[in-house]
Image (cartoon, rainbow, N blue to C red):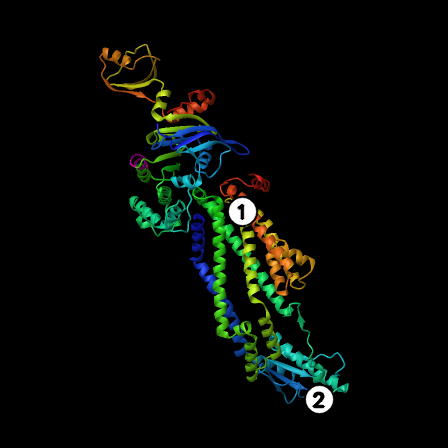
């Protein structure tokens, strides 16, 4: 009962904080704003660069065609050096491209003169136009007609992976989901774990701990705090989930997730608009997203979040109880906890590439790393026994760390003024 | 004699380097104001932490109304104010007290009512929505006291309650402590290293030093036991005659402080002077202060041990 009162306070004081509201509302808004902003900027306000060209090479005559971002302006006569520099300085042109009559098979250089930095995107575009033209010329010289070339290049065979459950799987999307969820878990475990630690430290240095443990047991206080913060995290997820769903509906993206046919109709709708999108690509991504088992991923995510959080939060609480007024002292105790999390991140980044190697399997079962590593494997499909073993060992793991933390905590929280060593902490754990 | 509200038997708590509490026994009758005295580091706070159930004793037993400690029942009958004050800095004062009261087993509505009662009583109502960090030291001290008594505990444990309080607020608190003991029959354990505070407040005391009990009993009885037959007499005129059975300790103006020989009646020197036609203005017995008793005992702890007095 009293634990409930503690949970309530821990939860409410955090949720009522301005920083919580700001973080929860602002992060997705910022994220969405950024996405829209980038899209908006890249579609509407592309500045067109004016490139003056003087082409002496006959085969390049029609190579440069103006588009939305680059406007090619052929000059009638070759300008003198000072003339073109003046023109560039005055801002009449952004660049001057001079194509001399060179041997296609030689390692020639073509010069682009600019007044300032033109931008990588524009340079790449010009470079690829040159490359393409050279290739076409070479093909023609070899006796291959351009139409034939198009036929050869159009690759209509694609590797389609189907797993034993009959679902088509896709490594790209699995990699993405694995990476994102692994990273989110890393972030949240660290973030909320630290939150628990700071709050324990505050109670200790404020000396309120002594008053509270004269009313409830230290375990109730620690456990209430850990649960309270977990609820804060879940609340945050819930708000983000709802926000995401609303946004998906608004943007129509949800079609991908809910029903593949919607995505197909959307794509056919899009194609009528004559937009320069790689339709096949969009279709494929849509299909892939629709084939991911979202329910399973979200459930496992929540499981590993809670399991991993409980495991680490207990350890962080124990560390918080060891810290005296001197905050730097706490550092030496946080290192042993932070290391496995960082190790998990390292394993995770190799796991997303190769989800079934030995390190990945070990990392996904060992409870200190399993939340992060297993989440990176789940989108690829994991054998049932490994999932069970991992889940089981995580549960055992957090029961163990909570038990251990409770022992450290109940002594540490009331220990003042004395520097605490690892050796002493060890004694507390084994003391009954 | 009814069952004492708290009875401590053979309590021991050893830390790795020191014997914090070494075989201490005493009992506290219900409704008394009980002083736990000792210099810094004597083991007072460790003792209080065991009494409040925060730490477990290594040996010995603590009985509440004759029963062994049971967190569910006894936590709620105790109010503990530790020496180092602690409150949530960012929490509003009203909310904070309500929260602590709820942890002591009050329902939400009871907690609100009790908090309002105490805030009104101690003129704190205007602080309700203030955060603790915005209170002055004296104010937060008062708040701490309210947080200790809000759940109407039968046993109040106050560790150095007056430290950091100005005289006005210290008196307000003192009056509250007296009132709680006399009108509401609460038992109060009052821990301090400042002996002079105890003399006016406590009726029972226990004195500890280096983890050991060196004395306990009723304050007046203790003073009687340790008195040295010192008397102070004041005359209107200079005195020239002195009886043979007194030892002069001090003498200034028309005042004499003397020690009476063992077994002599205090009226004897008085009648001697009256016979010599001196005018006595004032005649009092000088009882030792607890501080003096304490210093005397600590100077020679081994000889002091036989003085352990078992009262009641």
Task: Label 1, secondary structure: give it.
Answer: helix
User: Which residue is the extreme one toward the top?
Assistant: B244
CA–CA distance in space, label 1 to label 2: 78 Å
- Residue B232: x, y in percent? 30, 19
User: Residue B278, relative to residue A147: is it above or below?
Assistant: above
The residue closer to the viewer here, B18 or B285, is B18
- Residue A198: x, y in percent? 50, 51
The residue closer to the viewer here, B33 or A70, is B33
Side of A385 relative to B182 (left or right): right
Side of B234 relative to A43 (left or right): left
Q: Which residues are magenta?
A: B177-183
| Residue picked out by circle 1 | A318
User: Would you say the residues marked 1 and 2 are in contact, meaning their CB atoms lie under 8 Å apart?
Assistant: no
Give residue A58's mark. Answer: 2
Rendered image quadrant of residue A257: bottom right
Residue B180 located within the stretch drawn in magenta: yes
Nearer the observer: mark 1 or 2; the answer is: 1
Q: Residue at x 39, y 41 (%)?
A: B76
10 Å crowding of disc 1: few (<14), some (14-19), many (20+): many
């Amino acid at each position: 009962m009293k634990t409930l009162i503690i949970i309530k306070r821990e939860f409410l004081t955090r949720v009522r904080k301005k920083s919580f509201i700001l973080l929860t509302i602002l992060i997705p808004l910022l994220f969405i704003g950024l996405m829209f902003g980038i899209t908006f900027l890249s579609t509407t306000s592309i500045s067109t660069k004016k490139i003056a060209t003087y082409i002496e090479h006959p085969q390049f005559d029609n190579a440069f065609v103006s588009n939305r971002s680059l406007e090619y302006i052929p000059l009638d006569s070759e300008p003198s050096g000072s003339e073109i520099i003046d023109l560039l300085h005055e801002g009449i042109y952004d660049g001057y491209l001079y194509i001399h009559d060179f041997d296609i098979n030689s390692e020639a250089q073509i010069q682009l003169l600019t007044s300032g930095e033109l931008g990588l995107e524009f340079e790449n575009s010009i470079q690829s136009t040159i490359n393409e033209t050279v290739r076409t010329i070479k093909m023609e010289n070899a006796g291959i007609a351009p139409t034939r070339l198009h036929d050869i290049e159009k690759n209509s065979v694609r590797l389609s992976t189907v797993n034993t459950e009959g679902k088509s799987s896709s490594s790209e999307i699995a990699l993405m989901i694995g990476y994102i969820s692994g990273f989110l878990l890393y972030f949240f475990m660290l973030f909320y774990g630290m939150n628990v630690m700071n709050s324990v430290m505050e109670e200790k240095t404020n000396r309120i701990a002594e008053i509270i443990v004269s009313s409830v047991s230290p375990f109730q206080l620690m456990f209430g705090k850990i649960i309270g913060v977990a609820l804060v995290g879940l609340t945050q997820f819930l708000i983000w989930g709802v926000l995401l769903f609303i946004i998906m509906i608004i943007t129509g993206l949800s079609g991908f997730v809910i029903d593949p046919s919607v995505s197909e109709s959307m794509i056919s709708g899009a194609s009528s608009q004559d937009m320069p999108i790689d339709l096949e690509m969009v279709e494929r991504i849509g299909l892939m997203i629709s084939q991911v088992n979202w329910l399973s991923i979200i459930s496992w995510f929540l499981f590993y979040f809670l399991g991993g959080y409980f495991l680490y939060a207990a350890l962080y609480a124990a560390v918080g109880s060891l810290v005296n007024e001197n905050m730097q002292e706490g550092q030496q105790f946080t290192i042993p906890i932070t290391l496995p999390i960082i190790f998990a991140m390292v394993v995770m980044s190799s796991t997303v590439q190769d989800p079934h190697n030995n390190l990945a399997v070990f990392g996904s079962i060992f409870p200190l790393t399993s939340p992060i590593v297993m989440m990176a494997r789940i989108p690829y499909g994991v054998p049932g026994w490994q999932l069970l073993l991992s889940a089981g060992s995580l549960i055992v793991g957090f029961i163990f760390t909570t038990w251990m933390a409770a022992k450290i905590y109940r002594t540490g929280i009331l220990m003042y003024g004395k520097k605490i060593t690892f050796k002493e902490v060890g004694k507390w754990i084994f003391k009954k | 004699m009814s069952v004492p509200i708290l009875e401590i038997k053979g309590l021991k708590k050893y830390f790795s380097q020191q014997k914090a509490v070494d075989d201490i026994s005493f009992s506290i009758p219900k409704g008394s104001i009980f002083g736990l005295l000792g210099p810094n580091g004597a083991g007072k706070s460790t003792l209080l932490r065991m009494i409040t159930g925060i730490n477990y004793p290594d040996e010995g037993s603590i009985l509440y109304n004759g029963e062994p400690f049971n967190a569910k029942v006894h936590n709620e009958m105790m109010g503990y104010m530790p020496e180092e004050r602690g409150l949530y800095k960012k929490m509003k004062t009203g909310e904070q007290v309500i929260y602590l009261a709820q942890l002591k087993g009050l329902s939400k509505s009871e907690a609100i009512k009790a908090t309002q009662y105490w805030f009104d009583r101690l003129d704190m109502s205007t602080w309700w929505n203030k955060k603790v960090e915005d209170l002055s030291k004296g104010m937060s001290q008062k708040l701490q006291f309210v947080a200790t008594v809000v759940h109407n505990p039968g046993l109040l444990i106050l560790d150095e309650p007056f430290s950091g309080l100005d005289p006005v607020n210290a008196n307000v608190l003192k009056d509250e402590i007296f009132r709680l003991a006399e009108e509401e029959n609460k038992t109060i354990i009052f821990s301090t290293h400042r002996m002079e505070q105890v003399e006016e407040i406590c009726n029972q005391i226990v004195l500890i030093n280096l983890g050991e009990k060196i004395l306990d009993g009723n304050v007046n009885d203790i003073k009687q036991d340790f008195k040295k037959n010192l008397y102070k007499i004041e005359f209107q005129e200079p005195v020239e005659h002195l009886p043979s059975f007194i030892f002069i300790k001090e003498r200034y103006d028309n005042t004499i402080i003397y020690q009476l020989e063992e077994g002599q009646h205090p009226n004897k020197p008085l009648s001697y002077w009256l016979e010599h036609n001196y005018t006595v203005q004032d005649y009092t017995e000088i009882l030792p202060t607890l501080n003096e008793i304490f210093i005397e005992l600590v100077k020679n702890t081994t000889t002091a041990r036989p003085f352990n007095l078992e009262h009641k």
